C-alpha cells in the first residue's frame, strides 16, 4: 500500500510566545544595567568626571585661579620633565613607595605565614584582629604617635640615653618617612598574604618533606610560587597607597622629604596656587598607578602559573 510522503509542517509562533521571548531578552539586558547603575553613577561623578577635569587643567600651562585661561599645550608636562628639582621629587616618591613596599613584604610575610600555617586554629582570628587593631585609628593619629616616639626628647631617645647609648636623629628624615609608611600599611600586607597562604596546599609541603627536600627549598619552590598572587596584590596595594600618601611625608619627613603628593598639595592649596602645574603632577601620578595595575593584571597571574 503506497503511503504519501510526509508533509513538512512549520509551527507558527504565537504572538504570546514572541512577546515572552522579547521580554526575557530585555530582562537579561536590563538586569545587569540596573545592578551596575548605582556604582556606575558613583564612579562617573567622583572618578571619571574629576579625572577629566584634572586632565583639562593639566593642558593649561601655569593656570592659576582668577587669571585668564591660557591656550592649551603641554607646558606643564615639559616643565616637570625639564626641571631636575621636580624629577628628583618624583624619583624620591618612587623610592619611598618601593622601600616601604619591600619593608612591608619582609616584615609581613613571616607574620602571615606564622598565623596561617603555624598558629593554633582557634587563635588565628584573634591574632589577625590584634594585628589590624591600629587601623581602627586614623593615619594622622598614628603619625603623631611616631612623632612622640622619634622626636629628640621622645620615647626612643629617652630609652637609648637610659642605657648609655647616644640619641638618634630620625624625625624629619627620609628614614622616618619609610618607617611611617611601612607601619601604616603593614596590616594590609599581612591580611592579603594571610588570605593567600591560608589556601596553600599543605599536601605539597608534606610530600616535599617526605622526599627529603630541605625547608629552604620547600619555601622557594612551593610556598613562594603558590603565594605569589597574594604577594603581588599586597605589594601593589602598599605601593599605590605609599606613592600617593600625604600625611606621613608631611609630618615625619620635613623639608628634605618632598614627595609628589606634597608637591600637588602646594600647587593647589599652598602659596603657589598653580592649578595647571598641580594637575600635570596629578596626571603623572594617576598614570604611574594605572601602569602599575596594568602590568600586574597582564603579567602577574601568568608569572604565578609559570612558577607553579
Image (spheres, rainbow, N blue to C red):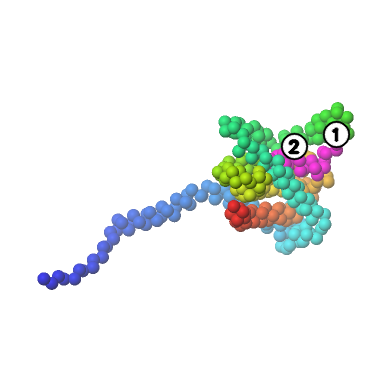
Nearest the camera: 100 or 15?
A: 100
Q: Quadrant of the N terminus?
A: bottom left
Q: Is residue 215 magenta?
A: no
Nearest the camera: 152 or 167?
A: 167
Residue extent of the magenta highlight = 168-186
Neighbourhood count class around disc 2 (C-alpha, 10 Å): few under 14, some 14–19, many 20 upward: many
Nearest the camera: 160 or 240?
A: 160
Residue 279 x/y as whole percent: 71, 54
Residue 17 x/y as whole percent: 31, 56
- Looking at the rendering, which quadrant does residue 193 occupy? top right
- Looking at the rendering, which quadrant does residue 136 occupy? top right
Going from N to C along the chain, the mark reached first, 1 or 2, is 2
Nearest the camera: 307 or 28?
A: 307
The secondary element bearing badge 2 is classed as: helix
The residue sitting at 79% across, 33% down in the picture is 149
- Looking at the rendering, which quadrant does residue 249 occupy? top right
Vertical relation: 258 (above or below) 138: below
The secondary element bearing badge 1 is classed as: loop
The residue sitting at 66% across, 34% down in the picture is 131
On the question of residue 166 being in view, the answer is yes
User: Residue 152: which disc?
Assistant: 1
User: Residue 143: which disc?
Assistant: 2
What main secondary structure does the magenta stretch of the protein show? helix
On the question of residue 290 being in view, the answer is no
The residue sitting at 40% across, 56% down in the picture is 25
**Total marks drawn?**
2
Q: Does 77 sit left or right of 24 as displayed? A: right
Residue 13 x/y as whole percent: 28, 60
Amino acid at each position: 500500500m503506497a503511503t504519501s510522503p510526509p508533509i513538512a509542517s512549520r509551527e507558527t509562533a504565537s504572538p504570546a510566545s514572541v512577546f515572552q521571548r522579547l521580554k526575557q531578552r530585555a530582562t537579561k539586558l536590563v538586569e545587569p544595567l540596573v545592578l551596575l547603575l548605582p556604582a556606575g553613577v558613583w564612579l562617573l561623578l567622583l572618578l571619571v568626571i574629576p579625572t577629566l577635569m584634572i586632565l583639562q587643567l593639566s593642558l593649561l600651562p601655569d593656570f592659576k585661579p582668577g587669571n585668564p585661561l591660557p591656550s592649551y599645550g603641554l607646558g606643564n608636562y615639559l616643565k616637570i620633565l625639564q626641571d631636575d628639582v621636580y624629577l628628583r621629587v618624583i624619583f624620591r616618591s618612587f623610592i619611598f613607595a618601593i622601600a616601604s613596599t619591600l619593608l612591608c613584604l619582609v616584615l609581613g610575610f613571616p607574620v602571615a605565614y606564622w598565623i596561617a600555617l603555624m598558629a593554633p586554629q582557634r587563635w588565628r582570628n584573634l591574632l589577625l584582629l590584634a594585628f589590624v587593631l591600629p587601623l581602627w585609628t586614623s593615619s594622622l593619629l598614628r603619625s603623631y604617635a611616631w612623632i612622640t616616639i622619634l622626636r629628640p626628647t621622645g620615647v626612643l631617645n629617652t630609652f637609648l640615653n637610659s642605657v648609655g647609648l647616644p640619641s638618634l636623629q630620625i624625625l624629619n628624615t627620609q628614614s622616618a618617612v619609610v618607617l611611617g609608611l611601612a607601619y601604616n600599611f603593614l596590616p594590609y600586607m599581612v591580611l592579603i598574604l594571610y588570605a593567600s597562604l591560608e589556601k596553600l596546599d599543605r599536601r605539597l609541603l608534606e610530600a616535599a618533606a617526605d622526599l627529603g627536600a630541605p625547608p629552604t627549598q620547600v619555601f622557594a619552590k612551593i610556598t613562594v610560587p603558590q603565594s605569589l598572587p597574594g604577594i603581588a596584590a599586597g605589594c601593589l596595594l602598599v605601593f599605590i597607597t605609599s606613592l600617593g600618601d600625604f600625611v606621613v611625608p608631611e609630618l615625619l619627613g620635613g623639608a628634605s622629604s618632598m614627595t609628589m603628593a606634597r608637591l600637588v598639595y602646594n600647587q593647589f592649596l599652598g602659596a603657589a596656587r598653580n592649578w595647571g602645574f598641580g594637575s600635570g603632577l596629578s596626571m603623572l601620578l594617576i598614570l604611574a598607578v594605572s601602569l602599575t595595575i596594568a602590568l600586574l593584571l597582564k603579567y602577574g597571574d601568568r608569572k604565578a602559573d609559570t612558577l607553579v
